[in-house]
Amino acid sequence: MMRGIYKSFPGVQALENVDFDLRAGEVHALLGENGAGKSTLIKILGGAHQPDVGQIFIAGKDIHIHSPGDALRAGIAAIYQEFNLVPTLSARENIFLGQESTTLGFIRRREELRQAEALLERVGVEIDPDIPCNQLSIAQQQVVEIAKALSLDAKILIMDEPSATLTPQEVDHLFEVIRDLQQQRISIIYISHRLPEIFQIADRITVLRDGQHVATKETTDVTRDTLIEMMVGRRLEHEFPHRDVTPGETRLAVTNLCRGNAVRGVSFSVGQGEVLGITGLVGAGRTEMARLIFSADEPAEGEIVLDGQRLKIHNPRDAIRAGICLLTEDRKSQGLILKQSVVENFGLPNLDHFARLAFVNQAQEQESLDKYVRILRIKLANSRQLVANLSGGNQQKVVLAKWLERNCEVVIFDEPTRGIDVGAKYEIYQLMNALAVAGKAIIMISSELPEILGMSDRILVMHEGRVTGEITDVEKATQEQIMHLAVA
Amino acid sequence: MRNKFSLFATDYGMLFVLLLLGAFFSGMTIARQNPTGAEAGRQLAKQILSQAGSQRHVFIAASASPDDKDFAAQLERTLQDAGVQVLATVAGGPPDVRQALDKAIAAKETIDVIATTQTAANWKLLAELGTRMPSLAKTRIVVPQSYWWPNFLKRDNLSNVAAQSAIFAIVGIGMTMVIITAGIDLSVGSLVALSAVTVALCLRDLCGGFEATVWGMVFSSLAAVAVCGLAGWCTGLLVTGFGIAPFIVTLAMMSVARGAAKILTDGQNVYQVPKSFSLFAMGRPLGIPNAVILMILLYVLAHIVMTRTTLGRYLYAVGGNREAARLSGVPVAWVLIFAYTLCGALAGLGGVIQASKLTSGSPLYGTMYELYVIAAVVVGGTSLAGGEGKILNTLIGALIIAVIGNGMNLMKFRDFTQEVVMGLLIIGAVLIDVLRRRGWKILPTN
């Protein structure tokens, strides 16, 4: 279907002679590390980019896609991580946005409603089509996007990381929807970093690496390890690096942390060199709890004690001064200033280190950044490059670099490896271990249970704002055990 | 090479536009220039010396106008310094000149050259000298030579342009900072009026009106800047403390400040200000108006703050992504309050300059200035979305706006036309900026 695709951007060969074919009614997973060229490929299909060289055929017909409109007319619809929904409009209005059914310019509301209900029924969910999208859950919004694609009579559906923000149950439901679509001979290109999901849903798998096509295999012909090997191009010894630290005495202790219904009386402690994993379903209050410690929204009720001293934290600035840093789950909207360069982002929390009498010592700042670029193996053209132009993994490394320079005593990671490829994940785990060795207290919030099980010394499970379980014997813990606590 | 050029072009493309405009208006305003005053005196002295050496006897005649008096005085001084014998210097009407000439003839002096101005040379007495005073038939009459030169590039005009742009440019510093934080300040025009009124009232009521001392003027100016800084501070508090949109807060402040200026003065002009107060902005001890020097100093300072200091980084960070900046420990509220306070204070300074320029204070000063200042910032390429922009480009933007106004005045366009052109300029500048961001594609790919 796509043959010999080449695409280059200034300084980068994003795709080099990539072939890709999709059968009717199959789920085809597209795998690869960040920067492997997956996004570029689907953006070419979706009409956001044009290939330098190469052809696209649909049902044997040579298709030229110059704009998203062309792609839609060719029956290709894409659902990106950031949904294309207008939050204040209802599900129905979103589904028919741009293709309203009208009589003399008046919207035929009843007709639309009937069609919307039919579409939503086709994907097997019950959503009131007249509820504004910002009142729907992420999973429901996703379904609205799918319904919208169906309304456009899409034959090919591209789903970019559809499960990234869903809870396990929601993912299960998404898979039911996908299987339904398969029955209707709709082809799906499925992009995800979660290998177990891919084994569950995909018929075939294509792996890209450094802009080149590595292999296309039937799912039944590959194992997890061979997939990782194909993606990384080298063998990873283990997914999670070994750590040789015995947690020491308590460093951070929080007691009875409260905020409305989101966080209800959370108490825990983290020791020296300890990695405390915190998990739970989306909405369990994990992120809210972390932001509360950091006073990101409002000062916390409850007590926060670091190294025996009670902290008075009124805003993030206080928290940072006290030696606590928070790596937010959403790096694009909260962790980085995308309009600014790498070095400016790196310097932001550390300007007091680099400034003499309010003048920023740019040479020192640059030198310090260079050090982290080496240690973290950040791939940059140069440090004046806009951080927006880095891949997800490299962006996360820039966030890490800025907080490492801060040398905080308590490091809170919120979904540290979301949307990051396997190789970069491993490096981030190694770094976490290095922090533990240095005696820091580490809190890792994650929805990915293998990660929680692989990295934590101790696990807290949260549900509806409360800690519903603590697992101290991580070696023997299972995902099922955690899920039981999470749905408490 | 090409890369470097395009970098320069995107960073300082507006400088190029400014130079083009300058060239255009220079070309359109070339005219025959008749030197006047001291400058004419110097020029004519040079001419006489080069033609005749120092052996000649020169008689200087000029009319009684101030320019001609300057001319005569300067010429006499320069010639005497060069050792030329100046028989007499007359600045008056034709009868005075006639009398002086008769006296010289009576004293048996030889008059080789009569140096005079264009105006005086047209008097019947001098134009028909040979027939009216036959004894002087051989005497040559010299006048300053006229020459071709653009009106736009005359020294006086250029310093006028600079002075015109000074107020917009100075207020533009604060506005650029506010816009970089993703805000806007609509109150600056009204604050210019409030400040001008405050300084004039302080001088009239507290410092003795026309007799005010230098210290009185300094005090009044500082008071005016402080009042406007306070207004800016209030804006900042409302924006940060209550999260009201800057557009709304400053729209309200615009109305409040203008109204306050009118209340304070009862809607009247306040002109009881010492003449010497105009020296604050328009005096030129260094050859260019003080306001321009002040403007240059402030820009150097602001450029350093924005590019080298923690505060500058914070301003960009708050505008680029307020949430990320806050979570990185940036004191967002203080940064915003600073920006609005400074913007208010600089608008106050602009008002003081305005009052000094016009030696009076009126509640109607600064009308529409907020739009001109925002235009200067936008023409300078600062994005209204915040987080981006260069302070020096605002200076270029302010100069562009002043040059267009001045150039069109020189070309004798009417005010109305100027307003249309100014509007088109703003659209053009934003269009260029949008296209640049998009990589010069005319339409989006959808």
Image (tube, coloured by chain):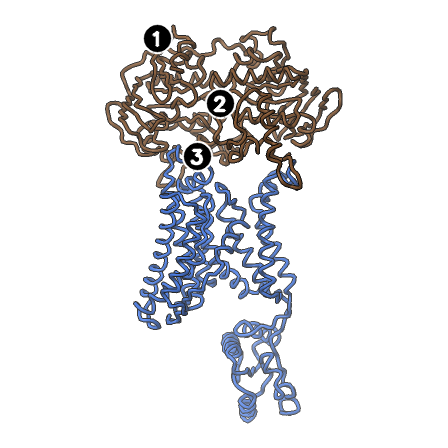
Chain colours: A brown, B blue
Q: Residues under labels 1 and 2: Cα distance? A: 28 Å
Q: Which of marks 1 and 2 is in front?
A: 2
- What amino acid is labelled 2 in the image? Thr
Q: Quadrant of residue A65?
A: top right
What is the x, y in percent for residue A13? 63, 25
Residue occupying image coordinates x 35% and y 66%: B201
Q: Residues under labels 1 and 3: Cα distance? A: 48 Å
Instruction: From the image, tell me which residue sits under label 1.
Output: A473
- Label 2 is found on which chain of the structure? A
Under tag 1, what secondary structure? loop
- Give the answer, above or below, for where A384 lies relative to B407: above
- Label 1 is found on which chain of the structure? A
Q: Residues within 10 Å of mark 3 (few under 14, many from 20)?
A: few
Mark drawn on residue A363: 3
Under tag 2, what secondary structure? loop
What is the x, y in percent for residue B287? 47, 63
Which of marks 3 and 2 precedes in the sequence? 2
Q: In which quarter of the image is residue B261?
A: bottom left
In the displayed structure, does residue B312 sit left or right of residue A409? right
- What amino acid is labelled 1 in the image? Asp
- Name the quarter where the C terminus of chain B is drawn: top right
Which of marks 2 and 1 precedes in the sequence? 2
In the displayed structure, does residue A469 sit left or right of residue B65? left
Number of marks: 3
Q: Residues under labels 2 and 3: Cα distance? A: 40 Å
Instruction: From the image, tell me which residue sits under label 2.
Output: A165
- What amino acid is labelled 3 in the image? Ala
Of residues B84 and B207, the one nearer the viewer is B207
- Label 3 is found on which chain of the structure? A
Q: How crowded is mark 2: few (under 14 residues within 10 Å), some or many (20 or more)?
A: some
Residue occupying image coordinates x 52% and y 73%: B38
